[in-house]
Image (cartoon, grey):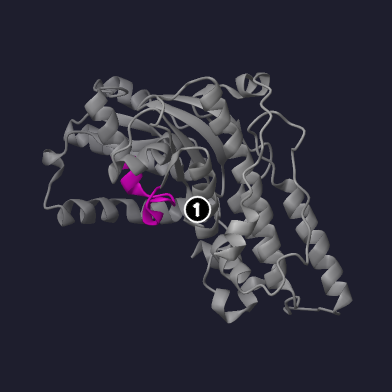
Amino acid sequence: MFSSLGGIIPSVARVLHKNNITKTCENALRAANLTLKDIDAIATTVKPGLPMSLRVGTQFGKYLAQIGKKPLIPIHHMEAHALTARMSREINFPYLILLVSGAHCLLAIVDNVNKFYLLGTSVNNAPGEMFDKVARRLKLKNIPEFRTLNGGLAIEIAAKKASNTEQFFFPPVMTRYDDCNFSFSSFLTLCNKYIELEERKHNIVGDAVIPDAYNLCAALQLATVTHICHRTQRAMEFVNKMSLFPKNKQTLVVSGGVACNNFLAEALNIVSTELGYSFIRTPPKLCTDNGTMIAWNGIEKWIADVDIIRNPNEIEKIEIEKTVPLGENWIKKVEAAKLKCKWVKIKKKLLNN
């Protein structure tokens, strides 16, 4: 639905949450052949996110905890993303997480279920948000093949159809910064400039799409993926320099909606192999926001016996939080390390696949 609207509309999302949350919960219990009495605890997302949607879920979680006399486990949305891959694969702590989505782009060390160290984050746009805006400006939905697709997937598929991946140039960004932060705003600005120039050049009006849209998508995707890989490589080299992971047990996990992009996954696998890391992508069906990852985070916390609130009065005091960072901020530590990285050459390997 939101794909057709060009993005999530908070007020509409709240109504949909409210109208469907009870039925969804009932269906889940029925499918598992369980009742509320069989449940040990209630896990619910309380931060960060859209307040209207968070409030619906948190209030319902409190309600279930109250009527079922169950403990409540508050969940941090990004922590849940960071741990989801452990549901289907044996991944030992610590490991490196790259979370790429429509709202976030960050790198962090996952030390245990409850301890995270933030190495880098986006200083402006998130990659998924940027892809959506470019796809909308390119009017890709006017091409029948892309009509029902989200912006990121449309750009990924369009990029495969490119005839000239070097027609449009995107200069590297943040090359003088010694941290692991990300920036995607210049990609968006340059895309808008290229589209405007192409529209003038070809007298494009109305719903028409520029002739070289696929080439632009390919160039944008390559530039974005290269930027993400460079910042991720720096994080890996920081971990190695500081001896933060056991030797021969270094793992990179990627999650979030943009992790569904196969081109990105291939690139990260190349970088991981070069630096001696195991690479694990969260199963694509669990990369985007989903209830399963929240439940899994609840299970992890339950087993570790952390963040479990049993007192009904304390449960009632739980509040949602719109903006909350992930873990302890180590960005300055990365910057202070003054790492000089020799970038893994991914372009040739990617485009030859």
Q: Could you tell whether 220 is left or right of 171 in the image?
A: left
Q: Is residue 4 depicted above or below 123 in this figure?
A: below
The answer to which quarter of the image holds residue 136 is bottom right
Question: Which residue does the image show at 56% across and 75% down from the upper left?
Answer: 147
Q: Foreground residue, 165 or 43? A: 165
Q: Could you tell whether 320 is left or right of 212 in the image?
A: left
Q: Could you tell whether 315 is left or right of 342 in the image?
A: left
The answer to which quarter of the image holds residue 227 is top right
Residue 285 within the magenta-colored segment of the rendering: yes
Q: Which residues are magenta?
A: 281-295
Q: Would residue 46 be seen by someone viewing this image from the given angle? A: yes
Mark 1 lies on a secondary structure that is helix
Question: Which residue does the image show at 88% across and 75% down from the upper left?
Answer: 201
Disc 1 crowd, CA 10 A, few/some/many (<14, 14-19, 20+): some
Residue bearing mark 1: 265
Residue 15 image position (x, y, % from top left): 44, 54
Q: Could you tell whether 241 is left or right of 218 in the image?
A: left
Q: Amino acid at mark 1?
A: Ala
Question: Which residue does the image show at 62% across and 79% down from the upper left?
Answer: 143
The answer to which quarter of the image holds residue 150 is bottom right
Question: Which residue does the image show at 54% across and 58% down from the upper left?
Answer: 263
Q: Foreground residue, 223 or 130? A: 223
Residue 141 within the magenta-colored segment of the rendering: no
The quarter of the image holding the C terminus is: bottom right
Residue 226 image position (x, y, % from top left): 64, 49
Q: Is residue 30 depicted above or below 160 in this figure?
A: above
Q: Would residue 60 be seen by someone viewing this image from the given angle? A: no
Residue 279 image position (x, y, % from top left): 43, 44
